[in-house]
Amino acid sequence: MELSELSVEYRGQGMPILCLHGHPGTGRCMAIFTDYLSPYFRTIAPDLRGYGRSRTTQPFTMAQHLEDLSVLLTQLDQPCLLLGWSLGGILALELALQHPGKIAGIILVGTAAKPVGRHPAITWQDNLLTGLAGVINWLIPGWSWNIATLGQRSLFRHLISQHSAQAYRRIAEEGTPAFLQTSNRANRALGMALRQGYNRLGELHRIHQPCLMLAAANDVHITPESSQETANALPNCEWRLYDNVAHLMPWEIGPQLCHDMGDWLERYGFLQLDAPSDAKDGR
C-alpha cells in the first residue's frame, strides 16, 4: 500500500463523528456539516485515498478506502458516529458492518446500499455548457447571469434543483476544487466497483445502531427510492425525504438538514439537551 496516511481535518472536542465525502469530493465538502457539528463533537473529515490531498501513485480498489478508514477508527478511544454523503454513506455502512463495536450511530445522506441512478444521457452540449458555467462560477461565484444563462441548462440542473447563489458559491468554493483534485485512480476505482455491481441490502439487518437517512426527491444520481429501500432494510432507521432538491441538497438546504440532524442527535442522546439554540437552527 503506497499511501501511508490520509489527509484529515480534525475540529472540535467530544464524541467523535467521522464525516465521509462523496465522489468527487474532499473532506472540505463536508463543511456544511462540520461547521454545525464541531462545537459539540470532534469532527473527523478525511480526504479519501486518491481525493484532495490524500495523493497516491498506485492503483487501488474501493476496499482500500475501508482499510484506510479502519486505521482511523483504531485511533479512537470510544465508539464514534458516522456521517456519510453519497459514496461516503456506502463506506459508512461498510464500516458499520465490519466494526459494529466501534460505531454508535449513522447518518446517511443521498446514498444507498444498492445504489440506483436514473441520470439522463449526457450530450456534448451538456458538457460544453457545464464547462462554461463551472469556469465562470469559479471566477465569479454565484453570479445570477451565469446561473440563469448557463447553469440551469448545464449538468448542474441534475445536481441541484434550487439554483440559488448560495448553492453555486458552494460549488465554486468546495465542489470545483474537489473535482479538480479527484485523481484518475479514484475515478477508475469507483468505475470498477459500479461495473461489478453493489448490493448490501441483505446484510443491513446486522446494523442495529440508530440510523438517519436523508434523501432528495429529485436525486438522479442515487434515487430516493433506492435510499428508502436501504432505510427500510435497516432495523433502526428514520427516513426523511426533501422536496425540490437533488444530489447536492446539503448545499441547497444545509440549515434544514442540520436542524433535522440536530433533532435526531438530541433524541438519541448524542447531543446534549442544553446545547445552545443556534446549534439547533443549523447556524
Image (cartoon, rainbow, N blue to C red):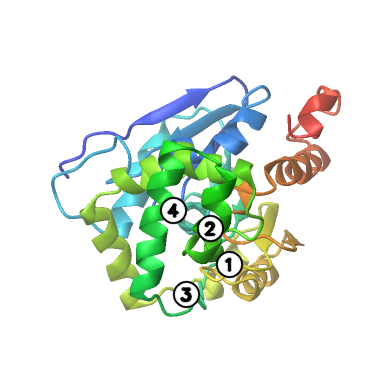
- Going by the numbered disc 1, the residue's amino acid type is Leu
Tell which circle, 2 or 1, labels the residue nearer the N-terminal end: 2
Tell which circle, 2 or 3, labels the residue nearer the N-terminal end: 2
User: Are the residues tagged 2 and 4 within 8 Å (C-beta)?
Assistant: no
Please provide percent x and percent y for residue 58.
Answer: 14, 49
- Going by the numbered disc 4, the residue's amino acid type is Ala
Point out the image quarter for the N terminus. top left
Please provide percent x and percent y for residue 14.
Answer: 62, 22
Left or right: residue 218 versus residue 178 is right
Tell which circle, 1 or 3, labels the residue nearer the N-terminal end: 3
Q: Residues within 10 Å of mark 2 (few under 14, many from 20)?
A: few
* Residue that label 3 marks: 199
At a point 58% along the width and 56% down the height, the residue shown is: 148
Closer to us: mark 2 or mark 3?
2
- Going by the numbered disc 2, the residue's amino acid type is Thr
Left or right: residue 74 versus residue 228 is left
How far apart marks 2 and 4 lie (CA) works out to 9 Å
Q: Residues within 10 Å of mark 4 (few under 14, many from 20)?
A: many
In this rendered view, identify the residue nearer to me: 127 or 72. 127
Q: Secondary structure at mark 2?
A: helix
Please provide percent x and percent y for residue 109.
Answer: 60, 55
In which image quadrant can residue 217 be found? bottom right
* Residue that label 4 marks: 133
Tell which circle, 3 or 4, labels the residue nearer the N-terminal end: 4
Q: Secondary structure at mark 3?
A: loop
> On residue 204, which mark appears?
1
* Residue that label 2 marks: 149
